[in-house]
Image (cartoon, rainbow, N blue to C red):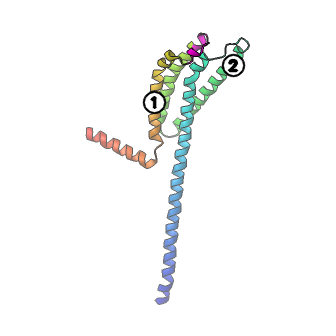
């Protein structure tokens, strides 16, 4: 028995050490995977946000377009190409967000894009119908900024959805549990 006890103690310690080491490796992989997934989502969310913000700048860009006769055609092409790229990026982001598996963010983005298309699209159309600005005092375009209030409000709402969606998984779960408890306590 003493020989078996002498052998089993080092072997048992080695097995326990291996199990602890394996647990550490698995935990590290899980944590790093979670971090990588959060970063991937943040990158997608940033891309989606940048695309819709670029879209929101279009009426301002159109109003500030170059007016020299030799530049007008090139300026129209430049702005329409930019507008097309932005709209394509928005469509791509809509598909990626829908496929991402976070329906609240995808729905919030759909609502933001819908509002942007109705508000920004109308203002961009109207901007093409007007003469471009010519003086520095016209650069701020306060009335145009005011007309974009519904878009800015929806943008703020979407940013709130993003803030919740990029939390670590454990904090999202805690938030969902608190939300359920709050709803149950109100009932």
**Disc marking residue 156:** 1
Instruction: Name the secondary structure under disc 1.
Output: helix
Instruction: Name the secondary structure under disc 2.
Output: helix
The answer to whether the residues at label 2 and label 1 have Cβ atoms under 8 Å apart is: no
Nearest to the observer: residue 79 or residue 61? 61
**Disc marking residue 77:** 2
Residue 172, above or below 3? above
Nearest to the observer: residue 61 or residue 46? 61
Q: Is residue 97 visible?
A: yes
Nearest to the observer: residue 110 or residue 170? 170
Q: Residue at x 49, y 31 (%)?
A: 109
Nearest to the observer: residue 59 or residue 102? 59
Q: Looking at the picture, how far across and down is residue 83, in whole percent?
A: 62, 23
Q: Residues within 10 Å of mark 1 (few under 14, many from 20)?
A: few
Magenta stretch encompasses residue 52: no
Q: Residue at x 51, y 63 (%)?
A: 24
Q: Looking at the picture, how far across and down is residue 100, in whole percent?
A: 52, 40
Q: Looking at the picture, how far across and down is residue 143, in whole percent?
A: 49, 15
Quarter where residue 91 is shown? top right
In this picture, residue 63 sits left or right of residue 111: right
Residue 70, above or below 103? above
Q: Residue at x 47, y 37 (%)?
A: 162
Mark 2 vs 1, N-terminal side: 2
Q: Quadrant of the C terminus?
A: top left
| Range shown magenta | 127-139
Residue 18, above or below 159? below
Q: Is residue 94 visible?
A: no
Magenta stretch encompasses residue 135: yes
* Residue sitting at the far bottom: 2
Rounded to the nearest angstrom, the CA distance separating label 2 from label 1 is 31 Å
**Disc marking residue 72:** none
In this picture, residue 166 sits left or right of residue 93: left
């Amino acid at each position: 028995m003493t020989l078996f006890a002498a052998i089993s103690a080092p072997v048992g310690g080695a097995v326990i050490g291996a199990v602890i080491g394996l647990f550490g490796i698995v935990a590290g992989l899980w944590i790093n995977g979670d971090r990588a997934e959060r970063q991937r989502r943040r990158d997608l969310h940033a891309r989606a946000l940048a695309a819709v913000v670029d879209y929101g700048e279009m009426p301002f860009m159109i109003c500030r377009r170059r007016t020299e006769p030799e530049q007008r055609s090139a300026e129209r092409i430049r702005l329409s190409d930019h507008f097309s790229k932005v709209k394509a990026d928005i469509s791509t982001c809509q598909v990626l967000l829908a496929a991402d598996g976070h329906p609240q963010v995808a729905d919030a983005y759909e609502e933001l894009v819908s509002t942007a298309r109705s508000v920004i699209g109308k203002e961009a159309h109207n901007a093409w119908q007007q003469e471009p600005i010519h003086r520095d005092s016209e650069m701020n375009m306060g009335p145009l900024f005011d007309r974009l209030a519904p878009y800015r409000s929806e943008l703020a709402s979407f940013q709130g959805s993003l803030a919740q969606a990029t939390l670590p998984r454990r904090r999202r779960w805690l938030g969902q549990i608190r939300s359920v408890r709050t709803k149950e306590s109100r009932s």
